[in-house]
Image: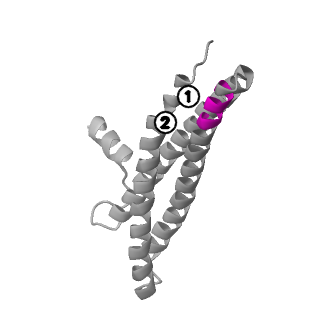
Amino acid sequence: MDITINTPALLFPAISLVMLAYTNRFMALSSVVRKLHDEYQTNKSNNNLQLQIKNLQYRIKLVRRMQFFGVTSFLLAIMCMYTIYQDNFELAHITFAASIISFSTSLIISLIEIMQSTRALELELSDMEGMEGENLVDYIRKKFDK
């Protein structure tokens, strides 16, 4: 496969947009953390609140990893462009492949964080009347069983 300097450059817009989305996700999480921190200071015995806090701690770790792999992908794409400029095509292929793998890893972690976010919403809804223990999958399953 021939690789030109434009090949890794194709990743730049995708990585930039994903990094913007990750930053927005991080900002939203930090806002929720501040809100929950205030609630925790007033009511430390609320079990649902403690579960929410644990969920948020895990999600923050995931966002940090998503950002790490996104930035790594960006840097590897830049290295790939430099190696092409230096006419070192063997290293260019390796860095381009590593960039795509890093970007894919970032997206997979993002998917995990989205699933974790859904669990957080289910936790939030669980204390409402009639919603105890029921998640979206159970709700759909009941609708089809009828």
Counting every numbered tag in the picture gives: 2
Residue 11, position as x, y percentages in the image: 50, 32
Q: Which mark is residue 12?
A: 2
Q: Find residue 60 and name its label.
A: none
Image quarter in which the C terminus is found: top left
Identified by mark 1, the residue type is Pro
Q: Mark 1: few, some, or many residues within 10 Å (few <14, many ≥20)? A: many
* Residue pointed to by mark 1: 8
- Magenta stretch holds residue 59: no
> Is residue 113 depicted above or below 14 in this figure?
below
Please give left or right for residue 140 compared with residue 74 in the image: left
Q: Mark 1 falls on what kind of element?
A: helix
Closer to us: 104 or 96: 96
Which one is in front, 93 or 85?
85
Which residue sits at x=45%, y=59%?
26
Q: Residues within 10 Å of mark 2 (few under 14, many from 20)?
A: some
Q: Nearer the viewer, residue 11 or 114?
A: 11
Extreme-front residue of the structure: 86
Residue 101 visible: no
Q: Which image quarter is the N terminus in?
A: top right
Which amino acid type corresponds to the residue marked 2 in the rendered image? Answer: Phe
Judge whether 122 appears above or below 41 on screen. Answer: above
Q: Position of residue 87 (x, y in %)?
A: 70, 21
Residue at screen point 37% across, 51% down: 135
Q: Residue at x 33, y 62 (%)?
A: 125
Vertical relation: 106 (above or below) 95: below
Pointer 1 with pointer 2, Cβ within 8 A: yes
Region of the chain picked out in magenta, as a range:
77-84
